[in-house]
Amino acid sequence: MKFESLRIENFRNIESQNIDLSSKNIVLEGINGQGKTNLLEAIYVLCYGSSFRTFYLKECIRHNSPGFFISGDFIDEDNLKERISCSFFDNKRKITIGNKEVRDRKELIYRFPCIVFCHNDILFINGEPEERRKFFDQMIALYSPLYFDEIRQYKKLLLQRNAALKSQEPELSSIYNERMARLGIEIMETRKRAVDDFNYIFSPLYSEISKSDLDLRIEYLPSWGKFSDVSQVVSYLESTFERDEKLSTTTSGIHRDRYVIQSQYGLFSSLGSTGQMRLCSILFRICESIYFKIKTDKDPIFLVDDVLLELDSEKRKMMLDRLNGFSQAYYTFLPFENYHEKMENASYYKVESGRFSVNE
């Protein structure tokens, strides 16, 4: 699918306006702070009902405005034109497709697959373990509704078990043990397969683009990795109950799983330069898109937010050449970044003070 046009009202610093998005490539040029990333964020909000920059949609409301409204005309997989809209007023989000209100964001994920490349992606490489868990969970959930539901169920059970631990109700905790163990084993198996598939794409691609001798691969280290069935996990949860109760939290489980980026010389986070880490983070997203294409035979939307600037000119060109397999792509560039010139089927916009004007 791809967007044909966008209507924005009172979102961030963007002036209320209609924007033509009928081209396959949309290039946004302007100095920092003018609204380039805000447009990408608005597209993301339409695709997922949430922001990639903040947990709170109220932060997206233009100053001194009661709320925001975004709508987009899009062409679906059957080449039919429809409209999606998202409004946020009185701290309530409302999303509609046509005349039907969307009740569950899961309806959006599989209809509007979208992959964003942004500066914070480097946290997948040098950040806390939860950042890598987040990446791989999103990557898997993008093609697997079952996995999406399993993660949701597990998080709910985890909250319930932690509440039982805090209230010192051991009989309730034991009820949740088997349910968490059963879900956890299934999630672990899915994650193992996904990492194997990811490495098959990622490792040779990093070697090719980086032109370094580092042989990188992702190692998945599950919290319950030494257990092979549900009964073993349940026994372990029972044996650690006193520790969990004392700490008022569940100290083991798939929410404690780790992914580490290893090279033949050790941890990449300790060895890699800033440029190598930035390159690696971009390749994470490219591999995510390749993986998605293999699993679904669909092309996602790309939102590429100024992530190439830290790379040298040769690698910038190589990365742009690798950015393919999308239904539509949006790029933000500073005015002097001319390595994107002569992009086919592209519309160029000059962005200034929240206003988008065609840049011939």
Image (spheres, helix red, strand yellow):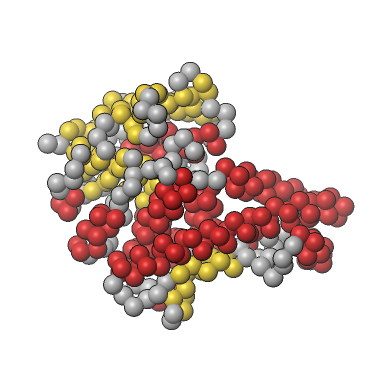
| Residue 59 seen from this side | no
In this rendering, is residue 74 above or below 288?
Answer: above
Residue 337 in picture, x, y percent from top left? 18, 52
Residue 133 in picture, x, y percent from top left? 54, 58
The residue located at (23%, 48%) in the rendering is: 333
Q: What is the residue that sits farthest to the right in this orientation?
A: 171
In this rendering, is residue 342 above or below 1?
Answer: below
The residue located at (40%, 51%) in the rendering is: 289
Q: What is the residue that sits farthest to the top in this orientation?
A: 99
Q: Nearer the viewer, residue 167 or 231?
A: 231
Residue 290 in picture, x, y percent from top left? 40, 53
The residue located at (34%, 78%) in the rendering is: 213
Quarter of the image for residue 18 reads top left
Q: Nearer the viewer, residue 240 or 214?
A: 214
Horizontal side, residue 324 vs residue 256: left or right: left
| Residue 218 seen from this side | yes
Q: Nearer the viewer, residue 292 or 339?
A: 292
Q: Quadrant of the C terminus?
A: top left
The residue located at (69%, 58%) in the rendering is: 185
Q: Quadrant of the N terminus?
A: top left
Residue 171 in picture, x, y percent from top left? 87, 52
In this rendering, is residue 215 above or below 26?
Answer: below
Horizontal side, residue 89 vs residue 83: left or right: right
